Image (tube, grey):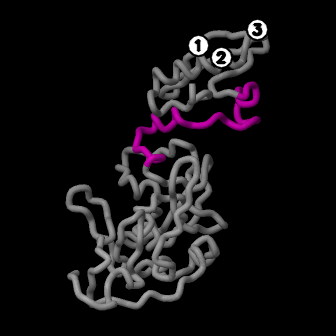
Amino acid sequence: MHDVPGSSRCARCCYCRDVAGALYCLRNPPVADARTGRARWPRVRPTDTCGAFAETRDPQPDIDNHSAHDAASAPNHQSSIIPHQSPALPIHTDQYGPYCKIPLTQGHFAKVDPAYYPWLAQFRWHAKTGPHAIYAVRTVQHNGRSRRIFMHRMIMNTPDHLVCDHANHDGLDNRIANLRNCTTAQNNANRRKRAAGCGSRAATSQYLGVAYDRRRNKWTAYVKKNGRQKNLGLFDVEEDAARAHDTAARQLHGPYAHLNFPND
């Protein structure tokens, strides 16, 4: 790309997208960074131009208005969703920071960092309900067989021997700050408390790592690592038992510990 006078510039092209203050060209597939191996769309300047220039189209409805059916059935060629959007990406914000929405099936959407949106939006994604969460997944053909690719594992380039953990337990929040590659044991340490009726200890306490001992009429605290349970003692107050669990969990699991009082 090079500078030229006139109106046929990247800033006026329908393939140019503003992502967090930087311009990217979505005309061609993303290229892999030689150092990190991560795929990125080419970054351009407003005055750059190329032979693929196309005038910006009239703005279409916000991506929020795309139906789940459209996201699932659109042709899977170069960026089937993005070229029909306005030049600026629709960026939303919640308590964890900014994000863009990737529409899925079943009325769901995945949250991704704005810088990753152009790369991820070129694929067709659907919602897959797992035993503990809902995930964004796409299907590819490999050696004549169908293979599932999970969005969070794709973003983190997770090795086969590791799992990709969602720190806030939201399987559709695929922002980098919420994802971390870890071992199965570390992932288990971040699991939420089981729902009522799921197991012998599930319904006896509102806290993780706490159960009511009816024979002793006290609360017992415990922590688990590698499938083995360690009892931490008996307590008169349920909250005291929960804090004992948190102390032990921090020592055993560090940043992967799922705590009852994370702000303490």
On the image, numbered disc 2 is attached to which residue? 241
Between residue 16 and residue 101, name the one nearer to us.
Answer: 16
Q: Amino acid at mark 2?
A: Ala
User: Which quadrant of the rendered structure holds the C terminus?
Assistant: top right
**Which of the pair 235/161 is nearer the observer?**
235
Q: Is residue 31 above or below residue 149?
A: below
Q: The residue under label 3 is which amino acid type?
A: Arg
**Magenta region: which residues?**
177-206
The residue under the point 64% across, 74% down is 65
Distance between the alpha carbons at the discs numbered 1 and 3? 15 Å
* Position of residue 125 measured from the top left corner of the image (x, y, whole percent): 52, 68
Instruction: Tell me how far mark 2 sits from mark 1, CA to CA.
Output: 8 Å
Residue under the point 56% across and 56% down: 93
Camera-near label (2 vs 3) is 2
Residue occupied by mark 3: 216
Relative height, residue 21 to residue 174 (above, below)? below
Percent position of residue 174, x then y: 49, 54
